[in-house]
Amino acid sequence: MPWVSILSVAVVLFGLRAKLVSIPLSEEISCDSCLVKLQLLEDLPLILLALCAYALSRFLKTRAWVVPLRLFTLAIGIVYLLDLAIYRNFFVRLDLRDVVVYGQQFDVVWRQLLHAAGRTVVYGTGAMLAAIVLGCVLIRPARSVAAKRVAVVLAVALLVAQSARMMLPYESPSIWAIRNVIAHNMTDGASAAYSDDMQAQIEQRLAGGPASCLAGSARRPNIVVLIAESWSPYHSRLFSGLNDWTPRLDDLARQGRYYPNFHAGGSNTNAGLVSLLLGRPIYSPIKAPLQLGPFEGAWSPDSSLPKVMGILGYETVFMTNGNLAFSDKGKWLASIGFSDISGHDAPEYDGLPRLAFDAPADDHLYRKALARLQQDRGKPRLLVLENVSTHHPYVHPYTLESGERAVFEYMDQSMDEFVRRLAQSGFLDENVLVVVSDHRAMTMVSGAERRMFGMAAGARIPAFVLSGLVPAGRDDTPFHQADLFASLAALVSDGACTQRKTADIFGFTPTPPRCLFHAPMSDWNSVHAYCGRAQARIRLKGDDSRVEWVVGRDAEADLLMETAMRRLSMKYSDVLPGTRRQAKVAAPVAPLALRRWTPDAARAHGGATIVAAAPSRRHRDCNIEFINGRPMEGNVPELDPFADLVVSGWVSDPKAKNSAPDARLLLRERSTGRLWRLPALRRSPRPDVVDAREAPWLSDSGFLARVPLELLAPGEYALTLAHGDGALAAACGEVAFRLSAPTRTAVAVE
């Protein structure tokens, strides 16, 4: 009976992980079973190790051996379960680095756990675990000869499984999710130090002078930076078209300058703050996990947004409604130069209900901020606000409704009210409001996001600016959180220079060609780079770092050097204001009209609208199934032109009994008759098509293709999937759509 229980637990845990890994990642390779096979290859040695330890505990008769072996088996099960829970809730793995950093504020973490899971669940789980541990200690050893044979068989199987795992290496963008939890924590590339020679090369490059200088305006507006916790493109119709949970913020963005191609430096709040406030494109400490601390390597910099603004005569204020003791955030903010810092313990919040991180509802934070902005201190002010109510576990602060949509609709309403009050007071006419997310939500990346943004799906975040000083309109330039520092420093001075290539989010200076970087929390040992249409992943290991794959760019050495400079040198992100490039900035194209705006104003809609669609021919010869993640069946929804059109589906040649290697997309502009032929890039197997047609030769029939948005002028288009030539050509899945021109704003610099 004990063996049945142990095996049942092992099968259930493996099944749960297989399901969790397959749901978000199978669409990436169009193959459900492939990931399960890879995961089995990874997890089997760990499962066999636990079973082998349990078998030995059933054979040995000395309590000094039996108890540790059973506790070891239990520990593997607990670690496996914790890894599952963390992956399910935060889309990251159980990582020793995170345990060390966040475990240093155990009291805050404990209260957050009680809030997220509930006291009944936490204490009930603790009681069950204590009972199991007690059972492991008190149950008397019972020597079993059969257990000895089982232990030998399991030990042999363990050696074979581990050998197979080591001998069959595989590469995948999703390797971080597939590895077993022990192997994941044994990869330590991020901890590998760079050589003295590499550091000397970096110092030599830094001595060459600034790489970017932005034009300045020498103005002294008040500046409010509103950091929207976890706000992601998939929450917004404007920034992705996937959901419409933040319609008020979308309307505000349309009236300002908004950025559909904005990137975060990392995947958590700490990384976002380092990028936004220090101008560092990535946060990737070079230290062993047990030596890491909160904001490792980012304390007391020579240059930061609050320090530079303070030098320019600004009062620098940081406000949040969250607990500043978490991750030593309060101490870190003081070390980077903020003169006034307030958190959950501000007297204005006394007696209010608390939720995540001891925070009251966000609207109390905004009322406190409005009161502060009304105070006249005789000098301009930089006010950075960080909300909390949209932090996981997503509980509405008033209704206590659980759900991601509910809390982001609350954020939409409360932020909208704050911005409208700023506008009605006239604040936004001569001052600046920047609204930007700290990171994409720590949820599973959907297949629709992957098809829309590619590898950058985990890095994309919404951002917009409202100000009478900044021209309104859509700006498709690829921007990064780290660009905010230099842009603000230039805006309030005679210009700003930095050692790295940066961009002006206000549009006063042309943006140079460059790469944007993102350090995903899901995989500490890698860094992603987005260089125009090229995307790459850098596997970290000091001087032995390597580019694992890259599309459309043959500059691996440059990528590796840029990554090293971002990780090794804080001076690489230093900003020198008012020293290099003075410019007279042209007046805004149009004044801000937010004072006349009301929440009931008509919402502007644009983009690509489907005007006709042929009936789906699913599981026939071929089919266009999705465009930008939208199913092409029945009534086709509106498509927005925020990125390239990403088309996917499947294609086959029934006569040749193969997956039609000559498949192509035919894109025809109806008004002119112009025709583009774009290759349909084959993807991984499509077992659903195989099953539907009962044709094994269709296994490799999936395709994915991109239609560059720059190719398309406003008008009506027909998109067809085809293969073969002449009279033998086959076509299917025709879809027609109308494309409207996005709003673009030109800014002159004298």
Image (cartoon, rainbow, N blue to C red):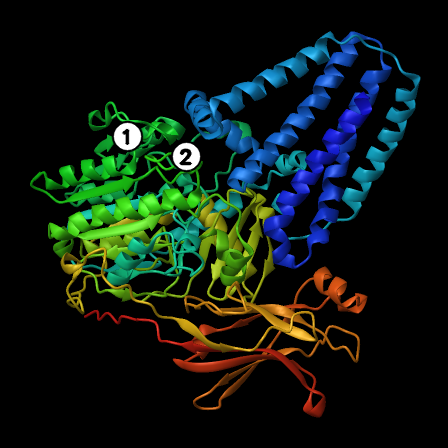
- Dot 2: element: loop
Q: Badge 1 local density, few (<14 within 10 Å), some, or many (20+)?
A: many
Residue linked to disc 2: 295
Going by the image, does 15 lie left or right of 640?
Answer: right
Rendered position, 412 above or below 647: above
The earlier-in-sequence mark between 2 and 1 is 2
Where is residue 91? Give x, y as percent: 54, 42
Q: Residue at x 93, y 17 (%)?
A: 145
Going by the image, does 443 lie left or right of 133?
Answer: left
Number of numbered discs = 2
Q: Badge 2 local density, few (<14 within 10 Å), some, or many (20+)?
A: some
Measure the C-alpha gap from mark 2 to mark 1: 18 Å
Name the residue type under label 1: Gly
Rendered position, 439 above or below 208: above
Q: Residue at x 50, y 57 (%)?
A: 449
Quarter of the rendering occupied by the N terminus: top right
Query: Which residue is more in the foreground, 158 or 204?
Result: 158
Where is residue 588? Give x, y as percent: 17, 66
Q: Residue at x 66, y 40 (%)?
A: 17
Rendered position, 5 above or below 644: above
Q: Which mark is residue 656?
A: none
Quarter of the rendering occupied by the C terminus: bottom left
Query: Which residue is more in the foreground, 407 or 335?
Result: 407
Query: Which residue is more in the foreground, 663 or 584?
Result: 663
Going by the image, does 576 lie left or right of 381?
Answer: right
Where is residue 87? Give x, y as percent: 57, 39
Where is residue 44? Give x, y as percent: 76, 37
Q: Quadrant of residue 641?
A: bottom left
Q: Quadrant of residue 441?
A: top left
Name the residue type under label 2: Phe
Residue linked to disc 1: 343
Going by the image, does 177 lie left or right of 514?
Answer: right
